[in-house]
Amino acid sequence: MTERIVSLPPLPARPKTGHKGTFGRVLVVGGSATMIGAPAFAAAAAYRSGAGYVQIATAEAVLLSVLGHAPEAVGLALPAGDDEWNDAIDKASAVAVGPGLGQLTSGNAVVDKVLAADKPSVLDADALNLLSARDRWPAGVRARCVLTPHPGEMKRLGKLFGKTEQSPATDDRIDTAVRAAAAFGAVVALKGEDTVVTDGRRVYVNRTGDSTLSKAGTGDVLSGITAALLGQAVEPFAAACVAVWVHGKAGELAGAALGPRSATARDVIAHIGPAFEAYAAFYGQAPSSSSSGEG
């Protein structure tokens, strides 16, 4: 029995007296020689979503290039020493790992460091691909995780929870996401048309978004939005629900301004602010829900 969520929570408070420490510190871990844009998009989206401070941990060879696309962020060169890495993790309010990380063996060590930390964390892209290549989900995970797979990534993860046959039908997507959330002890946001968000007990099916989001880089934007909300102390299921709504609405607004075939991930980032305003107009009330037997 799952509980279908039909209304979402109000946004986190934004006191006038706040400073950058008030609104959370996000650590983005990712990037590689062929994917310098991914962590920069996630960092920029986190800032647009209210984060007070964003740090990007990426390969030393591309660090300056990544920061050139996200100059508001500060950098940490990987591989980092234990003291530097522990300092970055300790100071982070939330972590996003995976955007552009690549699938080299060294990436597994980075993912394991995040999973071992008691931090709300977004696992996306190559973090999920690296995990799906293992025989089982890691034991002893301390991170409070939100997984944001697209259907291809979810299919690869399926072998870890016994569901390799998956269909695009909404009911099957809900079943897949619920089973994954239960198996991994995490919140899952299964991306696609009508993105499904679940913690294994509650289910929210998102209705915002259109084909504007069918561009490389837009998934990294979602990672940044989600991490920013986690960093502002929004609990993981609620953070994922709000993030997918805002992400979808930002895509719609970017498509309306530039045409859905022409808007890019950077354009979606530029419309995150208006998307949050639209969210506040629709969902400024307290959350409510209804029960159903789906999932």
Image: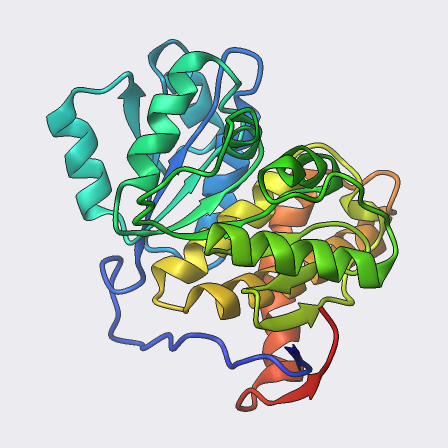
Which residue is at a point 55% across and 34% down the rendered structure image? 128
Nearer to me, 250 or 84: 84
Whole-percent x, y for residue 101 in the image: 49, 24
Left or right? Give the position of 235 relative to 118.
right
Which residue is at a point 20% across and 30% down the rendered structure image? 85
Looking at the rendered image, the quarter that the N terminus falls into is bottom right
Quadrant of the image occupied by residue 150: top right
Quadrant of the image occupied by residue 221: top right
Whole-percent x, y for residue 151 in the image: 74, 42
Quadrant of the image occupied by residue 23: bottom left
Whole-percent x, y for residue 252 in the image: 78, 58
Left or right? Give the position of 148 relative to 238.
right
Looking at the rendered image, the quarter that the C terminus falls into is bottom right
Which residue is at a point 80% across and 45% down the rendered structure image? 166
Which residue is at a point 41% across and 68% down the rendered structure image? 235
In the image, residue 222 above or below residue 8: above
Nearer to me, 229 or 162: 162
Whole-percent x, y for residue 268 in the image: 67, 48
Residue 72 appears in the rendering: no
In the image, residue 275 above or below residue 115: below
Nearer to me, 103 or 263: 103
In the image, residue 138 above or below residue 172: above
Nearer to me, 4 or 72: 4
